Image: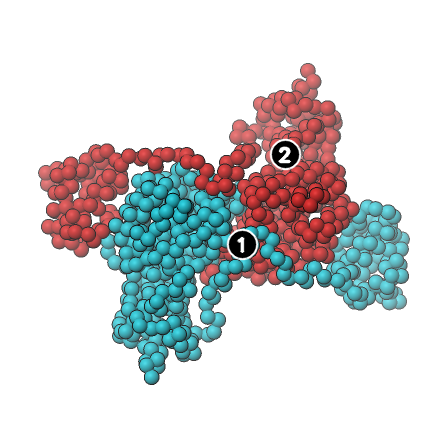
Chain colours: A red, B cyan
């Protein structure tokens, strides 16, 4: 049905003619289209048929349309409104935020070419049985969910389930009031930035780090202070000490440094907590894949050592379940809770009820734990296959095996970045996807390295992939 | 299973004793809890049983636990770590954003008391058949959805469905590239603010307006410029004209002014577009309930008249379906698209895939249109019942019937705010929930008014509610 608006000014036939003119000029009534039969349009708009006939005559007089004998009125080809500014696809940055946004480097995209084996590290292990289980939870949740506005903080049922989950698995003792449900780690970081940081203030990030977190902070206006990491995690002695350089917070990934894959030592954890107490600032702990550990003696979260209320703990379901689910949580110190809640409310009101309820039930009925056990067992097999394959086919690489997570790091001592580029190109030609670590640094390291993800390939594929990597390395020696 | 971390420093029994001490002091092992049998813990941690026995002895020597004959080792009542800063529930504002956030007035909450008839205006019409249909879509989408990271902009399938929907129903011609899927209107506003507005810059809002939009802008740091509205919508001649007062954008609700319930006239629409062209700034059109119209000659969106690429159109599914679904969209001019997309990426990466796919199919298979037709028919009945009831029982009220949406406005000419308060109190005591319009103003109007929502009550309930309102008004005369 044609959508026409009468603007109420002047005679009815003039109003209708204006509406038709606008529809034709804007292209909603394209050239060749037939106008509605006058009788039909008259009924639809509650006009007399004469009014419609008069409007059609006006339009035809203006050569916007023509009658074809008794067969109706048809739109002529007309020159449209100039698309002028519509087509103008670039304006200057409209705010300082936008200025900073436009200065950010492009996010490294995965290879678009067809690869036989892609050792990508961002996508987690995906499991068909999980889809079935999740589908059931969603359907049950849709039937049970309250359809009104959900609470800003998240459903109490989910927050309670998160408390029990992080208590059991990550040693984090909290209660449901401390938890805020968010749309994943990225939202947690952007809320924290707003609540803690003014434009121009310093924030410490690990070097290397996850680019999108750094980008969110930089776009917000934070001055990024990269702090080196070593085999024990962030080097606390390198944290700024001068009064005007104290970061508003230190962003860390203690359980599995991203992307260097090391674990923060207890001494460093204590030093970091001491630093925050001394300077009265904050620590953000991103426990992005703290769920997956492959060696005994799992380390609890940094937050479990925090007796001073300085750690904001951030967790996500996107890695443990699947990235298409945008659901995570932050566990805030009581002193920041209401501010973070206020920022969440103004950012997007709340997260959707049905996913929250499904997740709450998935945790409470044990499905989540079952999935994590199964995924951890499979990831352990894959990691073992990758490490064995590398030991056999690429013994020259210096491997950081990493006790958890979904990727390891392989350093190439003595290599140049140019030589690494040759390797990546050669590997891509042979169908092997390899990803360098240096784009994750503000200042690239002197030794090149590779991030080798093992979540996306089976153990057999990983054996074949490492053999292919061995061939690529052999090529380089010739 | 008890979660213990060995920190690797010193003898094994010292490490275990430290871990146990921490668990007891932090409360993870509460007073009276039995420590795991030594043999079991030894196996779990891959330690010798002697190591565990020695650690238990240390803990007992420190009086953190005691042995009870042969029955095991039990945790003593110990003084916990001082909750010091943990309990500290207030710190000063940690950023200028937080400072502004804390200055915002509390959002008006709905009456918590039990009401027989609640004429609330925020919650839309809810429908049991919709739950069934949505559940089916979700379940089908969960089975089909790609589980990897969704595109930042939203699924192409959903963006295409949105284009066809807004083209048919709102006269908005766009293509899928113009659409960005967001978590509702609130997120759209917060992204737009970041992309267009620096701290301290003016933004024009309608007076009256929806408080949470104003709050998001104020917290962002915008200087709010309230512009009066009348029976034709925003008064364009009252828009600021001085060079340093030109707002970065004008936020309007043309199809159904919130909350005054009037529709913006064509002249005003054209004047507003002219203003934006002249001052090279932007218009944000919030079409929050443009789906529901009760009189012929539905007005297309303001965006359909925009030939200059200055209107950012914002739509939501939360009102048309249900608020527990946090899904909406913005249709951006090409010149702002990549900046808005960048802001969305850094805010929360993207919206969840399964809901997007379900929504895309719900539009494409006609379920959404069917729901809208059914909802509009029912809302029309309710609106008619409300208007008839008011005419009969409250003829002194000055009604703005409103051609669309889910509430009407009733002005009380000659009343004072004190008298209105008496009415609200009396009504609440009699079980009738009434809501005043003045909290939606920066500067309350001289005439008090009521927002009367008709979406949440049946026609019969609305008849009874208006009768009760008549009684409350009669009481006021005594």
- Which quadrant is the C terminus of chain A positioned in? top right
How far across and how far down the image is residue B240, in percent? 36, 50
In depth, the one of B231 and B77 nearer the eye is B231
Chain bearing mark 1: A
Q: Is residue B74 left or right of residue B394?
A: right
Residue A401 visible somewhere in the drawing: no
Q: Earlier in the sequence, mark 2 or mark 1?
A: 1
Q: Identify the residue shown where x is 78% and y is 46%.
A: A267
**Labels 2 and 1 positioned on one and the same chain:** yes
Q: Which mark is residue B257?
A: none
- The picture quadrant where one finds residue A122 is top right
Q: Is residue A261 left or right of residue A94?
A: right
How far across and how far down the image is residue A239, in percent? 71, 42
- The picture quadrant where one finds residue A257 is top right
Q: Is residue B205 above or below residue B473?
A: above
Q: Identify the residue shown where x is 61% and y is 61%.
A: A177
Residue A237 visible somewhere in the drawing: yes
**Mark 2 surroundings within 10 Å by alpha-carbon count, few (fewer than 14), some (14 through 19), many (20 or more):** some
How far across and how far down the image is residue A19, in percent? 21, 46
Q: Is residue A323 above or below residue B60?
A: above
Q: Identify the residue shown where x is 54% and y is 41%.
A: A219
Cα–Cα gap, marks 2 and 1? 29 Å
- Cβ–Cβ under 8 Å for marks 2 and 1: no
> How many dots with numbers?
2
Q: Identify the residue shown where x is 12% and y is 43%.
A: A57
- The picture quadrant where one finds residue B41 is bottom right
Q: Secondary structure at mark 1?
A: helix
**Mark 1 surroundings within 10 Å by alpha-carbon count, few (fewer than 14), some (14 through 19), many (20 or more):** many
Residue behind mark 2:
A442
Q: Which mark is residue A343?
A: 1
Q: Is residue A243 above or below residue A79?
A: below
């Amino acid at each position: 049905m044609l959508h026409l608006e009468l603007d109420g000014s002047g005679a009815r036939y003039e109003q209708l003619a204006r509406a038709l003119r606008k529809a034709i000029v804007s292209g909603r009534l394209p050239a060749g289209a037939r106008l509605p039969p006058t009788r039909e349009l008259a009924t639809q708009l509650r006009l007399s048929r004469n009014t419609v006939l008069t409007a059609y005559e006006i339009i035809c007089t203006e050569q916007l349309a023509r009658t074809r004998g008794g067969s109706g009125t048809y739109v002529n080809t007309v020159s449209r409104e100039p698309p002028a500014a519509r087509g103008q696809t670039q304006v200057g940055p409209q705010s300082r935020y936008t200025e900073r946004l436009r200065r950010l480097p492009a996010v490294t995209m995965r290879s678009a070419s067809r690869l036989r084996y892609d050792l990508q590290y961002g996508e987690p292990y995906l499991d068909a049985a999980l889809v079935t289980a999740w589908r059931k939870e969603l359907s049950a949740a849709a039937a049970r969910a309250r359809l009104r506005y959900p609470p800003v903080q998240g459903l109490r049922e989910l927050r309670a389930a998160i408390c029990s989950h992080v208590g059991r698995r990550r040693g984090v003792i909290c209660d449901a009031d401390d938890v805020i449900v968010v749309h994943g780690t990225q939202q947690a970081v952007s809320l924290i930035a707003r609540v803690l940081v003014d434009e121009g203030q310093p924030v410490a990030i690990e070097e290397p780090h996850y680019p999108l977190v750094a980008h969110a902070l930089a776009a917000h206006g934070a001055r990024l202070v990269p702090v080196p990491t070593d085999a024990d995690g962030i080097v606390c002695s390198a944290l700024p000490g001068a009064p005007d350089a104290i970061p508003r917070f230190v962003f860390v990934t203690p359980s599995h440094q991203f992307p260097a894959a090391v674990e923060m030592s207890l001494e460093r954890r204590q030093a970091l907590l001491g630093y925050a107490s001394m300077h009265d600032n904050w620590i953000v702990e991103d426990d992005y894949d703290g769920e997956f550990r492959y060696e005994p003696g799992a380390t609890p979260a940094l937050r479990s050592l925090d007796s001073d209320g300085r750690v904001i703990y951030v967790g996500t379901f996107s890695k443990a379940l699947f990235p298409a689910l945008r659901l995570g949580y932050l566990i805030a110190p009581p002193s920041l809770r209401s501010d973070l809640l206020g920022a969440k409310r103004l950012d997007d009101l709340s997260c959707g009820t049905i996913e929250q309820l499904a997740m709450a039930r998935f945790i409470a009925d044990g499905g989540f734990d079952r999935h994590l056990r199964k995924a951890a067992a499979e990831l352990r097999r894959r990691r073992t296959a990758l490490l064995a394959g590398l030991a056999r086919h690429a013994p020259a690489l210096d491997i950081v095996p990493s006790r958890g997570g979904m990727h390891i790091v392989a350093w190439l001592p003595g290599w140049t970045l140019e030589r690494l580029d040759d390797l990546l190109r050669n590997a891509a030609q042979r169908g092997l996807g390899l990803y360098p670590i240096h784009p994750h640094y503000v200042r690239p390291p002197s030794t090149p390295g590779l991030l080798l993800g093992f979540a996306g390939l089976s153990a057999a594929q990983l054996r074949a992939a490492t053999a292919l990597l061995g061939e690529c390395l052999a090529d380089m020696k010739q």
